[in-house]
Amino acid sequence: MAYKTIPFEKRIKDNIKNYAPDKLFPVENLTEYFKAFTKACGVEILLTDRHGERLISTGDFSNFNGDVVANPGRKVRVCDRTVGHLYCRFDDVEDSGKVIFDLMLDQLVALLERLGEQTYLFTESSLYIDELEDKEKTQQQIRIHSEKLDPLTGVFNKLYFEKRMGIIDRAEIIPVGVVNININDWKYVNDHFGDEESDRLIRLVANIIRTESKAEYVVGRVDGDVFVTLIPMAEDNEAEEFARRVQAACLASEDAILSPSVACGVIYKSNVEQHLEDLLSDAEYEMFRNKLEIKNAPGYRERLEKRG
C-alpha cells in the first residue's frame, strides 16, 4: 500500500499488521525482566507473536502447541490489533497469591500494550514525516523544473531560454553558435493526423536535438515548431556539424506515421558587443534559406506524403 497517498489515521489503523512483537518491544530487556520475575515469584512466562510463534520463554512450555485460537492466553493488543499472546504458569502458588499475580500480569499486559503503542506511533510518525519531506522535496523540484522546462518537450521554455541567453551575453562568452531548427511541414502533419500526432512530431524532434546535443548546449523551444540551440565556446564548424547530425537523425527516423524533417540556420556570435537576441533573426533567415532548399529537393514531397 502506498502510504504517502492515504491519511495518517488510516495508515496507523492499517500498518500495525506489519509489526511483530520484536519490532514493538525491547526483547533483550524484556527477557531479563521476565527471568527476574520468574526467579522472584515462581511465575513462568511465555510470550508469542500473534500466530503463536515463541518469542520469550522463562519456563517449561514444552507442551504448548501454539494454538492461539483455542488457547489465546492474555492477548497483547496495540492499536486495536492483537500483536502477541502472554501465557503464565503459577501452579504452586496459593489461591490468594494467584489473585495478586493475576492483577500483576494484567498490569504487565497493559504496560506492554502501552509501550508497544508508543513505539508503533513514534516509528510510524517518523516514517510519515520523512515521506512528507521527501514528497515536498520532489514537488519543489517539479516546480523548479516546470518554471524552466517546456512541458511538451522537456527542453527549456522560451522564457528561461531567454534568461540563459542573457547570462551568456553578460559572461562575454565567444564564440557562441546559434542554431535555429524548424520542423518542415508541421502543419501538414497537424492537418492530416491531428493534434496528437503533430505534438508527437514536436517531441520526436526535441528528443533528437537533445540526443545530438552536448551537455553544455542550451536548447530551447521558442515557438510551436521552432527550437534554438546555443553552443557556448563553439569550435570551428561545430554548429554546422550539429545541425547536420540533427537533420540526418531526423531522416533516419523510422515511424509508422511521421516523417520528421527539419531546416536549420546557423549563425555565430563572434563579438562580445553582439547580443544573442539580435542574432536570432539572422539564424532564422538562414533557416528559411535551408528550408527552401530542402522542400525543393527531389524526393522530399514523396517522403512527406507517403504516410498521408
Image (cartoon, grey):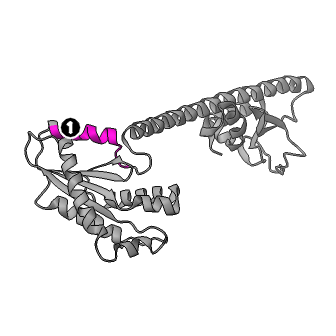
**Does 176 sit left or right of 259 as displayed?**
left
Give the image quarter of residue 15: top right
Q: Which element type, helix, strand or loop, lies under badge 1? A: helix
Q: Position of residue 85 (x, y in %)?
A: 79, 39
Q: Position of residue 232 (x, y in %)?
A: 17, 49
Is residue 216 something one can see in this rendering? Answer: no
Q: Amino acid at mark 1?
A: Ile
**Does 244 sit left or right of 136 as displayed?**
left
**Does 74 sit left or right of 78 as displayed?**
right
Task: Specify the principal SS of the magenta part.
Answer: helix
Q: Residue at x 22, y 61 (%)?
A: 289
Q: Residue at x 14, y 52 (%)?
A: 268
Q: What residue is disc 1 on?
A: 167
Give the image quarter of residue 296: bottom left
Callout count = 1
Magenta residues? 155-169
Is residue 22 something one can see in this rendering? Answer: yes
Residue 167 belongs to magenta span:
yes
Q: Position of residue 278 (x, y in %)?
A: 18, 42
Characterize the local packing of mark 1: few (<14), some (14-19) or many (20 or more) Cα atoms within 10 angstroms. few
Question: 47 or 90, which is in the foreground?
Answer: 47
Residue 162 belongs to magenta span:
yes
